[in-house]
Image (cartoon, grey):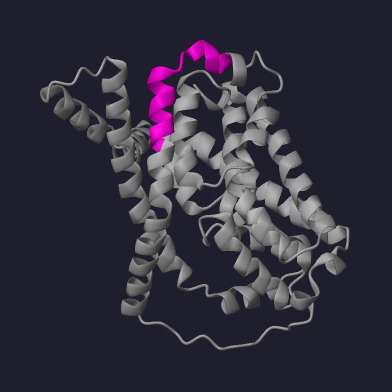
Amino acid sequence: MEVLKSIWLFIQNQILGMKWLNEGIGNGLSAAGLDLTSRAGGSIHFFVYDVIKITVLLCFLIFTISYIQSYFPPERSRKILGRFQGIAANIIAALLGTVTPFCSCSSIPLFIGFTNAGLPLGVTFSFLISSPMVDLGSLVLLMSIFGTKIAIVYVAVGLIIAVAGGTLIEKMHMENYVEEFIRTAGGADIETPALTVRERLVYAREQMTETFRKVFPYILAGVGIGAFIHNWIPSHMIERVLGNANPFGVILAVLVGVPMYADIFGTIPVAEALLAKGAQLGTILSFMMAVTTLSLPSIIMLKKAVKYKLLGLFIVICTGGIIIVGYLFNIFQYLLIS
């Protein structure tokens, strides 16, 4: 058992966390005459290390996940979801969301397509909530920074929110609040040709390149903010606003996160810096969920497909679920952070 534990710690610290890279960059910057104990030196070290680490992991993850996605084109995904009924369909939809687009704006066209094809509304909303909030990439990146327990619990809780939210919407029979052009369009049953291994590899490479170009600016921004927080903002200020001294920290984090537009890769460096400065775990994860699931651009896009009552219900369910999860994480933080 100890051998397996040692192997896993090596994978988490040296492969996923790339501690060797952190040490190598630190040695290189020190050799170049930079004082890593200074604020400027620490910020540069944090920025270079996190940008390289997240870029390497991001490209590998996008390529791998995109290759998996090549087996689940929209039509095949629709057929898979159509085989299930009730809460089982919501669970499958939420799980399917983990291997689909990395941000909420990319998920909405698929949500519209699934709704257009006649899938139950609650099922499509489970997919819509899950897709940006939790994915295989976020699981690996969270493991690399926060550890295995936090990463697994984060993904599990995200899936629970997606399943519960979709089920609630289904029970409330909100079909009439989907825009008419979507409900009456009907779906075309188009047979997708099978791809060869080479074609799947080409698809994965193209997806990796396209996605990387989209998210890299957010990575730079997120790491830059994280470096600033990590080295320039005093810990007592973070603890006062986002620590256990502020009972409204979770709500504040969600309200700040909603208007922003980023993805999981851009928010993780910020979360890493906030945790190091004393912010509570649940408050940080609530911020990440709010940014990725309820960004203002995605809400604007979703308004094109649904009416205000359904849009409002979606926002209330996601916001309420994220806030509840945030407080639960804060209560049980001691079990997750050793």
Q: Position of residue 133 (x, y in %)?
A: 59, 49
Quarter of the image where the N terminus is located: top left
Q: Position of residue 255 (x, y in %)?
A: 67, 35
Above or below, 236 relative to 284: above
Residue 252 position by quadrant: top right
**Whether residue 67 can be seen here:** yes
For this view, does 214 lie left or right of residue 191? Answer: left
Of residues 91 and 257, the one nearer the viewer is 257
Above or below, 190 relative to 150: below
Q: In this view, which residue lies farthest toward the left?
A: 31
Q: Position of residue 64 (x, y in %)?
A: 38, 61
Above or below, 72 relative to 30: below
**Whether residue 83 can be seen here:** no
In magenta segment, residue 225: yes
Which residue is located at x 76 percent, y 77 percent? 181
In magenta segment, residue 245: no
Q: Main secondary structure of the magenta part?
A: helix
Which residue is located at x 51 percent, y 24 percent? 337
- What is the count of numbered marks? 0
Q: In this view, which residue lies farthest toward the top?
A: 236
Above or below, 247 relative to 109: above
Residue 200 position by quadrant: bottom left
Which residue is located at x 33 percent, y 67 percent? 205
For this view, does 290 lie left or right of residue 316? Answer: left
Q: Position of residue 304 (x, y in %)?
A: 71, 65
**Which residues lie in the magenta part?**
223-239
Of residues 122 and 84, the one nearer the viewer is 122
Residue 284 position by quadrant: top right
